[in-house]
Image: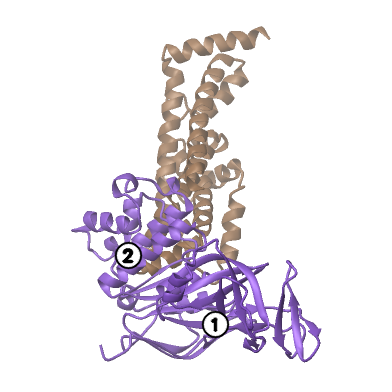
Chain colours: A purple, B brown
Amino acid sequence: MSEPLYRVEGLRYSYGKHFDLDVPELVIEHGESLGIVGPNGSGKSTLLNLLAFIDAPDAGTIYFEGVPSGPESLEARRSVTMLLQVSYLLKRTVFENVAYGLRLRGEMQDASERVREALSWVGLSPDKFARRMWHELSGGEAQRVALASRLVLRPKVLVLDEPTASVDRQSSYLIKDAIDRCRRMFNTSLIIVSHDYLWLNTVTDKLVRMEEGRLVEYVAGNVIHGPWEETGERLFAKRLSDGQVIVSARGTSLQSSAILNPSTITVALEPPKNESALNILKGRILNMSDEVSTENVLVEVVVAQIHLNVRVTKSSAVRLQLVPGKEVWVVFKATSLQWI
Amino acid sequence: MDYIWQGLQQAAVLIFTLDPETYSAVITTLKVTFTSITLSVIIGVPLGFLLGYFNFPGKKQLRMVVDTLLAIPTVVVGLLVYAFISRRGPLGWTNLLYTVPGIAIAQVFLILPIVISLTATAIEGLDRRLRPTLRSLGAGRVQLALTSLHEARFAVLIAVITAYGRAISEVGIAMMIGGNIKWYTRTMTTAITLETGKGQFSMGIALGVILLLIVFLLNSALVLLRRRTT
């Protein structure tokens, strides 16, 4: 156990002339749950394919438990399993789909029991679903069957590419529960790419960000895009659709974007008086989730067309009786916005 | 119009009284096509899989040759095979001319490109997510190939049924290689040609009805399979 689960050195991968993945160094420890965020086309899925040993890098080495590994290393590949964004089910029954990986490994002796167990973990009744054909499932059910066929393998690493992108809320919570269970029972490490920031926070304990093929330190934040207007004394203003205005210290350009750290925002039930902060905006709570890494609560507040994530302590959330649908005021200083 | 109507009535009698001459042509046809399709599947499915699954230099050119052979006229196949297996031909010693196996072997040359080409297309048309899915579930190279073929099974069956449809309905090879010998090499299509030439419509219509029925059953199977592949 002295070697980390993954140690990546000088990893490079190219798609023609237009895209380069470049990860000079990355370490993932045993049992760690890593979330990767970033815009479309930034290389997140490419990195997942490399870490799941589906593709081989153009250069660099991935050490898996200290051993240089790649697609040709069957042992490493069988320790890591990946769930695609839109999963593919084999043209077979649900049972045969879930048991497929066990069959490959020659572990069919207790397959029936393990398949039933895995199906129940993802919230699918084995009696109802085991004999169904692949084409008799909804999108959410198919995604959960695909997840069950990974969980049944009791993998060391579970790699998930946008696991909740094509499913409803209910399915996304069932997926979260199943992942949590897998982690608890088998100490499975997780590597997850998701655009669902709130959901990601509930299952990961570390986040990194990908930008144009490079991993950058994750700065938890809300991105507020331009255009801005110049207003008075060294300030920029962004007018929202409902007439409210976000005010920031002057940036480099009127088209720039700014990051607003969720920890620098406070929530109030009434507009605060004698407040020095320039931004006091009325909004409505859309969603709330526990933040695994900090034991705080992330509250998603919709202000006009903008979604702001606000980090509050659990005690504040209880004291203010925050619930989705409640009207609140978000308060932050003009200097809290960091230009990027 | 009367002779058509009479022909239809007599055809019904031939079918329902199990007329020996009519059914001799049916049985010969089934023997020939069963042999030719079996040989074509044994040879064509593995070749089609290799062509669709692997990338290699010259693949595009090979594919073009196979696809061109899809449209080869039956009489051309008949001519070439005749040239080889006639007494003066290099394979004359096989004595395959005017025999049922001779027709079947010649049909293999006709339908093998269909099996190869459509199997290759079936493999190439597999979902792009299949390979990463199987790899991520721990499949090795052989398991990856076998499961890919298994996933394409409905589309491969479509290839086989399409090829069988071509074999059962062709007339040129059966006529040239089989010689249309009554009770021996006369197939449904050659019998129809002959009887029509003689002005005897009843057996022609009877065989035509049976042929249409077989083609209808094949087409129904195709429709069902196409639903499975989507």
Of residue B107 and residue A160, the one placed in the foreground of this image is: A160
Residue sitting at x 47%, y 36%: B221
What is the three-letter code of the residue carrying label 2?
Answer: Leu
- State left or right for residue A312 relative to residue A42: left
Q: Looking at the picture, does residue A319 appear above or below residue B13?
A: below
What is the three-letter code of the residue carrying label 1?
Answer: Met
Q: Looking at the picture, does residue A178 appear above or below residue A266?
A: above
- State left or right for residue B38 relative to residue B74: left
Q: How many marks?
A: 2
Numbered circle sitting on residue B9: none
Of residue B87 and residue A127, the one placed in the foreground of this image is: A127
Q: Looking at the picture, does residue A303 appear above or below residue B227?
A: below
Residue A313 placement: quadrant? bottom left
Residue at the front extreme? Answer: A274
Under tag 2, what secondary structure?
A: helix
Image coordinates of residue A211 in percent, x first then y, are: 58, 83
The residue tagged 2 is A151
Under tag 1, what secondary structure?
A: strand
The residue tagged 1 is A210
- State left or right for residue B85 relative to residue A75: right
Image coordinates of residue A55 in percent, x first then y, are: 46, 76
Of residue A315 and residue B54, the one placed in the foreground of this image is: A315
Image coordinates of residue B9 in percent, x first then y, are: 55, 9
Among numbered discs 2 and 1, the one appearing first in the sequence: 2
Q: Is residue A40 visible?
A: no
Residue at the left extreme? Answer: A109
